[in-house]
């Protein structure tokens, strides 16, 4: 009888420790989720055109000098254009999606570009 | 009651001792003497892709197309080795695809063939990318049958594509001439037919090996001289019983005059890395790729730096971008 109690109490102690351990691990995860999006956007002017840079924490991740997806070295003609597409990329990154931009995205956001084929 | 507490305490102590022991074991397993270190660089996140196609011009790696488990892609990106940053470039103009092939002739990239699973079709169309104008031009369709899983390489004047799978495994080779914009079959490859093999180029010699045909991993190993266009058979890659170079869907690259074969598939996804020294014709094992084992990854290499990125492990699609330093000690803190 005494032996059974021993096993039972050890089992309980271990369970409590496991639960506490899991709780702390999960609490850590939640903190990470609540942490601000690691991606930040910077829009810069370069020789009368606009480019965007996306940083993962403090590290440069994407530097977009040309309008993505379209043919030729076309640059964003306004700060708003660069900002709109940059935000879209950050949005996709924070949803863990591949951050590729299509011509459709450019049209949906009224980006000024030439559709050359 | 007192003894009971004592015993319970002892057992707990014992348990934590075992746990601590296991914990130490898991972080201290690199006691072997293989050299090489993998360092994590700017990576895409979570929903990545595999079976993309890649080429390198100078310090820029170019990557496009691929498959993420749901969709086929035709987007195209550059990776700048100096700034460690990506840029999305002009879309690949052909239909979405995976397992395309790429090569470089004279600072222009070429990409074509492949597989579109949405239409279940092997492809033969081919395109040229000009980095100075960020634009693609369609060139003559591949001269052989539409196919995927080929190998490709370029010289200063010509591009070469061969082997692959068009419904059955192939061993034919074709040469692309950019001046006449035409493909011509070249003969002399005496190796086995295969798909998903690899090549690496050292000086004017292209080394071809690995790949699979009808479930058999190919072990023959060949050298192609870009000046003479002559194939020479070398020692099989399984000649030394301790070397496990044979595999399929691997990546290959060149660093400081040596060839490297990394990751790929052998039964399942693997992470082993082998170094080939052309002067001694010897293979040597290096530090394994330090993150998930993977197949259908891509590599960028300009002969002085090499990166391995993307790929998949089973149905898990991967994003990490790792730079390889073959002569450094392995370090766990830079992954």
Image (spheres, coloured by chain):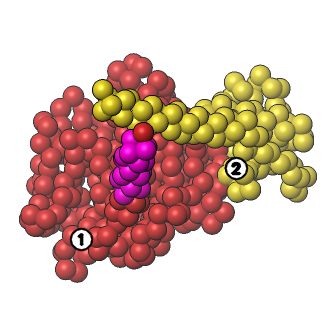
Chain colours: A yellow, B red
- Residue drawn where x is 70% and y is 57% of the image: A59
Answer left or right for B309 relative to B41.
left
Identify the residue under disc 1: B284
**Which residue is found at the position 11% from the left and 60% from the top?**
B238
The answer to which image quadrant residue A34 occupies is top right
Whether labels 2 and 1 share one chain: no
Up-down: is B241 above or below A21?
Answer: below
The answer to whether residue B17 is magenta is: yes
Image coordinates for residue A61, horizontal then vertical, percent: 67, 52
Q: Which residue is nearer to you in this view: B83 or A117? A: B83
Q: Is residue A104 above or below residue A54?
A: above
Tell me the chain of label 2.
A
Q: Which mark is residue A56?
A: 2
Which residue sits at x=83%, y=48%? A42
* Residue beneath the point at 79% across and 36% down: A87
Q: Is residue B121 left or right of residue A92?
A: left
User: Circle 1: is it few (<14), some (14-19), or many (20+) Cα within 10 Å?
Assistant: some
Nearer the observer, B68 or A4? A4
Give x and y (percent) for residue B71: 48, 25
Q: Position of residue B190 (x, y in %)?
A: 11, 55
Q: Nearer the viewer, residue B277 or B333?
A: B333
Q: Residue A5: x and y, percent?
A: 37, 29
Residue B41 relative to residue A44: left or right:
left
């Amino acid at each position: 009888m005494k032996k059974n109690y021993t096993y039972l109490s050890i089992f309980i102690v271990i369970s409590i420790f496991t639960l506490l351990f899991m709780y702390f691990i999960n609490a850590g995860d939640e903190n990470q989720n609540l942490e601000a999006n690691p991606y930040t956007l910077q829009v810069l002017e370069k020789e009368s055109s606009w480019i965007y840079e996306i940083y993962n924490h403090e590290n440069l991740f994407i530097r977009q000098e040309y309008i993505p997806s379209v043919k030729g070295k076309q640059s964003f003609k306004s700060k708003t254009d660069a900002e709109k597409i940059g935000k879209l990329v950050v949005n996709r990154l924070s949803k863990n999606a591949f951050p590729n931009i299509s011509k459709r995205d450019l049209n949906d956001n009224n980006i000024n570009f030439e559709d050359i084929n | 009651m007192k003894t009971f507490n004592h015993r319970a305490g002892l057992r707990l102590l014992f348990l934590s001792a075992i746990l601590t022991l296991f914990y130490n074991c898991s972080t201290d397993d690199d006691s072997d003497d293989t050299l090489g270190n993998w360092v994590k660089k700017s990576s895409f996140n979570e929903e990545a892709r595999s079976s993309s196609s890649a080429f390198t011009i100078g310090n820029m790696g170019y990557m496009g197309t691929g498959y993420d488990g749901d969709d086929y892609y035709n987007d195209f990106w550059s990776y700048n080795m100096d700034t460690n940053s990506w840029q999305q470039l002009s879309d690949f103009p052909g239909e979405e695809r995976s397992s395309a092939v790429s090569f470089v002739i004279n600072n222009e990239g070429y990409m074509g063939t492949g597989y579109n699973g949405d239409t279940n079709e092997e492809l033969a169309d081919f395109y040229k990318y000009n980095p100075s104008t960020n634009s693609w031009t369609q060139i003559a369709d591949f001269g052989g049958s539409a196919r995927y899983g080929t190998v490709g390489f370029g010289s200063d004047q010509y591009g070469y594509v061969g082997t692959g799978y068009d419904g059955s495994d192939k061993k034919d080779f074709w040469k692309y001439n950019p001046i006449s914009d035409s493909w011509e079959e070249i003969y002399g490859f005496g190796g086995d037919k295969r798909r998903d093999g690899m090549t690496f180029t050292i000086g004017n010699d292209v080394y071809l090996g690995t790949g699979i045909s009808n479930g058999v991993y190919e072990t023959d190993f060949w050298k192609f001289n870009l000046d003479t266009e002559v194939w020479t058979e070398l020692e099989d890659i399984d000649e030394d019983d301790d070397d496990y170079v044979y595999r399929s869907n691997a990546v290959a690259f060149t660093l400081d005059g040596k060839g490297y074969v990394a990751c790929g598939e052998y039964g399942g996804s693997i992470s082993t890395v082998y170094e080939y020294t052309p002067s001694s014709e010897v293979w040597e094992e290096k530090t394994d790729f330090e993150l998930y084992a993977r197949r259908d990854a891509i590599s960028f290499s300009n002969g002085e730096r090499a990166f391995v990125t993307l790929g998949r492990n089973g149905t898990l699609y991967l994003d990490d971008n790792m730079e390889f330093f073959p002569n450094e000690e392995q370090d766990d803190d830079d992954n």
